[in-house]
Image (cartoon, coloured by chain):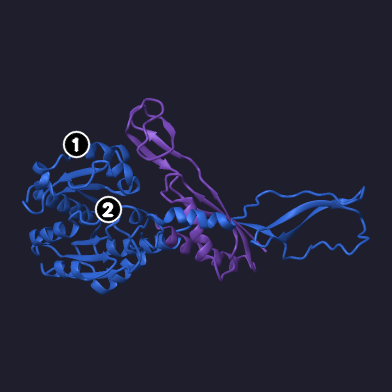
Amino acid sequence: MHEVSLANALIELVREQAVAAKASRVTRLVLEIGTLSHVDAHALRFAVDVAARGGPAEGAAVDILEPEGTAYCLDCETSVAIAARGALCPHCGGAKLLVQGADEMRLKEMEVV
Amino acid sequence: MCSTCGCGQGEKRVEDLHHDHAHDHPHAHAHEHDGDDGHWHEHPHTHADGTTHAHPHGHDRAHADDHHHGHEPGAARLVTIERDILAKNDAIAAENRHALQAAKTLSLNLVSSPGSGKTALLVETLKRIGGEYPASVIEGDQETTADADRIRATGAPAIQINTGKGCHLDADMVRTGMSRLGLPSNGILFIENVGNLVCPAGFDLGEAHKVVIVSVTEGEDKPLKYSGMFAASSLMVVTKTDLLPHLDFDVDRLIDNARRINPTIGVLKLSAKSGDGMDRWMHWLETARALRLATD
């Protein structure tokens, strides 16, 4: 999904944060992309690499953390870990799962010089 | 392939290109200088690919050679950010939402695959509203003003936003559209997103609800294939039901799949052409509008 738009928004955020941190260069980005966020990590890496060209984060390494999804099962009333939307409850096999997390797309931290 | 999001068949190629030069180097190297009671510290260096990291190492009290260690303020450091990547879009969406609330305007973000019948449904809907309350439309398409022209033919105000190569509307485009079009106070602003079940799911526009539209000429497994959109939508409208006698389409299976992704999603079945089910849709709109008018 929209990895180039995301990458552009990310690099804009990085630029602002680099100025705020009085950094001359950004050498590493640590991103948190939830497994249920529908962002393809490979496409995002490539898009970030392209979007960063000509700016302070050009050539920066990109670390992507992918926290697993969590959901609340309406049938057995417990919180469970799920790998994808539409997955069945690992406890009771129920299909009524309310997804609770892991759709985040965040810039967690960056390494600067 | 969508050149903005990189989705489609280009993805594989992206992956290969990246692997040509990816240089992941997350670990620190430790090496020791020939000193006994030396101290430890770190100094950074940068690889050709731009990766900078610090190597902790110990060394002797004195440097016999010309080996200098950088303790200058330019050393690599980690800055904690913890910001959403789409924070800027979300902030503009919040402004839009505030403006819509102030004008008591119900706004609906209509999302679907291309060709699901969004525009046909809107045209029929606007005819039925018939000026009873104000309604206007923001039309998102990559190219042409064809859809806005169809809407304007009903007498409703409409503005076309061409996203060019973009595959979705974002909050800033909608803000611009809202300011040029003016808000239908006490009425409904329909935002017809670009036909795409992937990208628009991630972009909040400031709408009250996303309404996902699926026609019976599509597959019953759409909710499972494009789960993000069904998870984000409050209502699923199944269109073109007049075609059902000619198809093997299993509506119940579509609904089961949608509820598997989003147990609370509402479902309406209709045909804009035959008019079947349109009354319930109009009733849903009036109820949602009444809720908007009744609450701040």
Read off the chain for label 1.
B
Q: Position of residue B51 (x, y in %)?
A: 65, 59
Q: Is residue B162 above or below residue A81?
A: below
Foreground label between 1 and 2:
1
- Residue for point 40% across, 26% down: A91
Q: Name the residue type under label 2.
A: His
Residue B97 placed where, x, y %?
32, 61
Left or right of B157, for residue B12: right
Q: Are marks 1 and 2 on the same chain?
A: yes
Label at residue B252:
1
Neighbours of disc 2 within 10 Å: few (<14), some (14-19), many (20+): some
Relative to A97, say whether A49 is above or below. below
User: Would you name the residue on which mark 2 appears?
Assistant: B209
| Colour chain B appears in | blue
- Specify the colour of chain A: purple
Local secondary structure at mark 1: helix
Q: Residue at x 45, y 49 (%)?
A: A104
- Judged from this view, the residue extending furthest toward the bottom is B180
Query: Which amino acid, by three-letter code, is at mark 1?
Result: Asp
**In this rendering, does residue A108 appear at all?**
no
